[in-house]
Image (cartoon, rainbow, N blue to C red):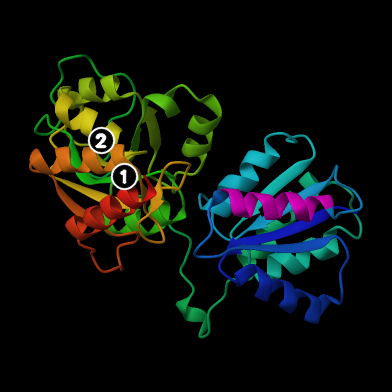
Amino acid sequence: MVGIVLASHGGFADGIFQSAEMIFGKQENLAHVILKPDEGPDDIRAKMEKAVASFDDQDQVLFLIDLWGGTPFNQANNLVKEHEDTWAIVSGMNLPMVIEALGQRMASDNAHDIAKAIVKPGRDGIKTQPESLMPKEETKAAPSNNAQPQGAIPEGTVIGDGHIKYVLARIDSRLLHGQVATGWTKAMNPNRIIVVSDNVAKDKIRKTMIKEAAPAGVPANVVPINKMLEVVKDPRFGNTKALILFENPEDALKAIEGGMDIKELNVGSMAYSDGKVNVNTVLAMDQKDIDTYKKLKDLGVKFDVRKVPSDGKQNMDELLDKAQKLVDEKK
């Protein structure tokens, strides 16, 4: 029997698991895992691995995920890449989709076949009352004035005003995940997401995951810092409204010192690692981070400390003072 893992942000997967069993009856080889607000990528991955280990047949596994590009999706995607011939992911999880998957696996022992079979029922389960509120199928829209030019553009061509625009520049150790792919992308309306990182640019797996996590209609690229500094000077990017992602403040400093005209940095999350101190629930720093933020401040860069657009802004000076005290106490 195909093992099914329901995974989500918050308690959604727990609730849909309970709903499915109320409708379909108690199920074996059906697991549910959630990412809590105070947990990170490694936590949800460990839960997924434990869930798969509990299945009778670990060769055929289907992940039903709440959101394409979120942390649960990214971690499931990382696992599936090691079993692409027999494991599968379907995002946009809803109750009709889960019920269809439970029914399909009674007749099929193939996770890929089940994945293909449940997409349409998942979509068809979305209805409105009155029925007249259901949107009609949209015809393909004509390209907008802000659309990115397609194909090779001759060097020296000036597009728009010839200057790339930064709708948001963010420091986030998780880079492109659900909060960025949905919340910040909708709030800032970029037409391209650019991860600027020497380390990630060398990592084929992470590059692929970032590109796959991009929201619909907004392509994602990963470039090393020096390449980004070339892009900044290239007039062919004049119509680009970029959401820039840095993995750490050191990369942001190097890019800004190299010529990226960034006036403000959104500070979203910095993961804990050995040698760092937890400043709050999402930011961990060491002395190098503190010193780097101070250098950025000396360059005139302002800070917008928010995890998601709806959060209130935090005071960066207070956070740096707190971080310094915690680092000093640790010595």
Element under disc 2 = helix
**Amino acid at dot 1:** Ile
Bounds of the magenta segment: 42-53
Residue 70 position within the rendered picture, expressed as x and y whole percent measured from the top left: 51, 53
Number of marks in the rendered image: 2
Apparent side of residue 281 relative to residue 231 in the rendered image (left or right): right
> Would residue 19 be seen by someone viewing this image from the given angle?
yes
Q: As rendered, which of 255 and 89 lies closer to the eye?
A: 255
As drawn, the label of residue 97 is none
Looking at this view, name the residue that lies furthest to the bottom.
130
Disc 1 vs disc 2: Cβ atoms closer than 8 Å? yes
Q: In which quadrant will I find the N terminus?
A: bottom right
Residue 302 pos. (x, y %): 13, 49
- Whether residue 146 is visible to the viewer of this picture, yes or no, is no
**In the image, is 151 to the left or to the right of 215?**
left
The residue depicted at 41 percent of the width and 61 percent of the height is: 281
Query: Which percent across, then down, holds residue 103?
Result: 84, 65
Is the magenta region chiefly helix, strand or loop?
Answer: helix
Q: Residue at x 22, y 55 (%)?
A: 321
Nearest the eye: 12 or 91: 12
| Residue 171 numbered mark, or none | 1
Tag 2 residue: 252
